Image (spheres, rainbow, N blue to C red):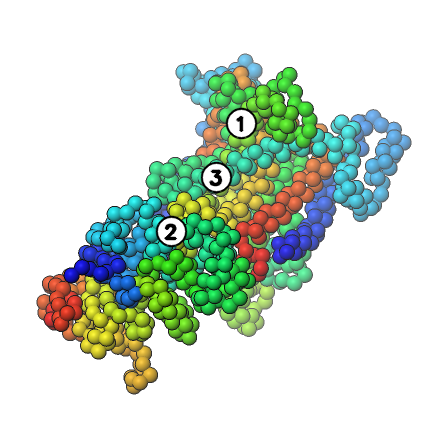
Amino acid sequence: MALYKYFIKRLALTLPTLIGVSIIVFLLIHMIPGDPVDIMLGDRVTDAARLALEERLGLNQPLHIQYWNWFSNAIRGDFGISIRSNQPVIEEIMSRLPATVELTVVALLIAVIFGILFGVSAARYRNTPIDYSMIGFSLLGVSIPIFWLGMMLIFFFSVMLGWLPVSGRLAMGTAIPQVTGLYLVDALISGKIGAFWDALKHLALPAFSLATVSLALIVRVTRSSMLDILSEDYIRTARAKGVHESKVIYTHALKNAMIPVVTVIGLQLAKLMGGAILTETVFSWPGIGRLIITAIGVRDYPVVQGVVFFVAFAFIAINIVVDLFYAYLDPRIRYD
Amino acid sequence: MNSEFKQVVRVYKRNKLAVVAFFIALILMILAVIGPYLAPYDPVEINLQLRFEPGFWEGSTDHFLGTDNLGRDIFSRILYGTGISLKVGYAVIAITAVIGLFIGLVSGYFGGVVDIVIMRFIDILLAFPPLLLALVIAATLGTGIEKAMLAIAIIYIPSLARIVRGSVLTVKEMPYVEASRAMGAGNIWIILGHVLPNVLTPVIVYLTLLLGDAILYTAALGFLGVGIDPTTPEWGAMLSSGKDFLILGKWWITVFPGIMIFLAVLSFNLFGDGLREAVDSKLRL
Amino acid sequence: MPDLSLLKVNNLKIEFATDRSKILAVDGIDISLKRGKTLGLVGESGCGKSVTALAIMGLLPRHASISGEVFFKERDLLKLKNKDMAKIRGNQISMIFQEPMTSLNPVFNIEYQMAEVFKLHRGKSGKEVRPEIVDLLRTVGIPNPERRMKDFPHQLSGGMRQRVMIAIAMACEPDILIADEPTTALDVTIQAQILELMNELQRVHDTGLLMITHDLGVIAQVAEKVVVMYAGHIMEYSGVKEIFSDPLHPYTRGLLKTIPRISRKTKRLEEIKGTVPHMSNVPPGCRFHDRCSERLARCSKETPPVSQVNGRTVRCWLY
């Protein structure tokens, strides 16, 4: 009940931000030097053809009308037609989306699960070799350039050892029936264990590189948050009640310690989305990140515009989910 | 002031890792200035006869760290790259500081509609994943180091403005501000004389922590080839050009620039962390 | 004569090792507690009272080293494995703490935090124990227990939270309840109610109560015997009547003077001059000598032995 009201309030606050985001995306692309019509038609073009295209794209109309047309289409998922491929932008996005989602979600899972596990262990065994190695790992991990890490992993595991593939999502000749577009899920649904294993091998290095920075940060925050919480009075109470130490740590302490950790995870989502662009470039991963970099390279403005708006929109939506989770964790937020 | 500074230094010195980081950062800063004079070769001149020459590990003395796919000397390029990365880093700090302070001061001090509009705008900027924002801005502005600086600074300006605004809201309620106003001081005088000096500490800490991050984003833009010319001896751009040759076993094209990025980011991060800890301890005393 | 004590602490020493030094927080104390009786443990903050209690509960941090014996029902608690000790905690020996505001976990509701004790020590499921929780909350004076047990700690007042803490502590009808300054953080009127509640529960369940406080006023209300601690030593150990009518140790007399009384016509509250020494730096001789108003020459040189005066125990060169 209270959570539901909170959700509605949070949603209402988001609308102006969303409109602002769309205005910025729209204006930015219009500020790009170079006329899109020139790019689309090439140098030699008749004035008639030029006018016709301008009219088709609505470029002859006043800016605010252009914006409104774009925005009203965009919220319905219509981002126009790609200059490069002549496909609707939304189709381009949708065909690449599962690759990015799979990569990002797996990376996030790695970062969250291991980050919390490592952070908790470091706090629990404070000032022991376990703790020191975790501190060292998190110090190095937050500063490592993930695109370089990715390349070094490729060199080590693919080139030198030959254990894992260099790039792509699947080996040549491996087929997975498309259901969700998430290869791991699809392979499991269709019961193709070999394909699942292949997809997993392709995913391992990109997901690990992408996870590293977030993993390191989550370790750091979990550790310090747990150390704070473990000295709280209610932890002593739990022990005085006869609760076993591991339950004290993983239930009584962790749920409290998670509050700052969730904030960090929420902030990491933005970094993961940015990091996905880099990781996809390193591993030739056919996702949204590759799409926008290619689009920027060839000045495919409808695609750039569409992807940026789409990602910002997704980011805002994810933030709402994070806030809800936050409210679930900390009852004080719900009721106050 | 002087004794406060000494106190910060004293606490900072206790953190041995931060001290090491400080010296590495210092060396990098010096290299950034003298690097071009030390470089044995031209960093951009292409020499196709000398492609993929290995370095010291195979006894080469001509090209200490080897040459890349276009025969350019990697050691020289790394030295030039230090200057580029740090220059971008400093510039990002300067741009962020000036614009972030200005926006934060105006927003916090004057409040009202100005504040609401600015804060909404900041919310909107923060709704973008940072790298994506920098990418789009860099793409919009076109290629060039100066443009990349601006694109990266836009990532940090909203956060700094928020921090400044928050501090201003506290400071402007302080009795000394009231007193100054009662004595007839104007807004500009109060902002520059009373508010600004009192919000500077968190700003400086934020800016120090930003340097490592900014270097990382510069390398990322260089790697993606957006906003930074791929032929410049920028560390990220070097990684990009060496990427396809890893499979051929030409590891040195990517290993050395990567180590430099890592080292620079790590040392500036540790320096920033140490400084923040030291300043925090001063505030607590 | 067999020892009827429920809890018997012999020569308990607790030492904390830090990087630079070792701190002897408790230096050889002996106390005993009988079923249904109340032992008061008094002294200023930093005297080692809470540390003693935590040692009995086995809740001291790992860097504390403990020696001596803590006998509970013929078992030395200090020799028990962590797992076995956990079975005693909250079940046969319970503890409530000074800070009701922070002693309950903010992210779990009252029902969960109470049910946990039943699940741990009675092996019951969450649904089974609901009526027991309601009963227990009603016993400790929480109105509307069916609804209140769904509340989170931040929705309750300090007094209410301490009632919940008492309910949790008494849930398994423990043999011993250790109360560490249970009323210090509360309003005076609430204090009296909480003390009364504890007395009542103790009488019903025949619980041995170890009441730790710096407030002799509280001791006067609840205790039969009193231990006066100072800087890790027991300074005086006697019946509550004797403590008030004929305090032996100068420190006890000092503490008594600090009790505010309406009948006494002093202009301001008295205090003992100086502070409790830090335990890494205990003065030689009698630990109280530098604050003592009846100091003798030898007090600063030799530590006074424990002596018996009319069946009472005191550690002072005056006797």
Horizontal side, residue C299 vs residue B148: left or right? left
For the residue pair B62 and A34, the one nearer the viewer reads as A34
Q: Chain of mark 2?
A: A
Q: Which residue is mark 2?
A: A242
Q: Residues within 10 Å of mark 3 (few under 14, many from 20)?
A: many
Q: Percent position (x, y) of residue A113?
A: 50, 38
Horizontal side, residue C62 vs residue A295: left or right? left
Q: Quadrant of the N terminus of chain A?
A: bottom right
Disc nearest the viewer among 1 and 3: 3
Which residue is situated farthest in the top direction here? B49
**Res B18 quadrant in image:** top left
Q: Percent position (x, y) of residue B98?
A: 57, 50
| Secondary-structure class at tag 3 | helix
Q: Amino acid at mark 3?
A: Gly
Q: Which residue is mark 3?
A: A115
Q: Quadrant of the C terminus of chain A?
A: bottom right
Asked if labels 2 and 1 touch by Cβ distance under 8 angstroms, the answer is no
For marks 1 and 2, give the CA distance.
44 Å
| Secondary-structure class at tag 1 | helix
- The answer to whether residue C259 is visible is yes
**Res A192 quadrant in image:** top right
Q: Residues within 10 Å of mark 2 (few under 14, many from 20)?
A: many
**Co-location on one chain, circles 2 and 3:** yes
Q: Which residue is mark 1?
A: A205
For marks 2 and 3, give the CA distance.
28 Å
For marks 1 and 3, give the CA distance.
17 Å
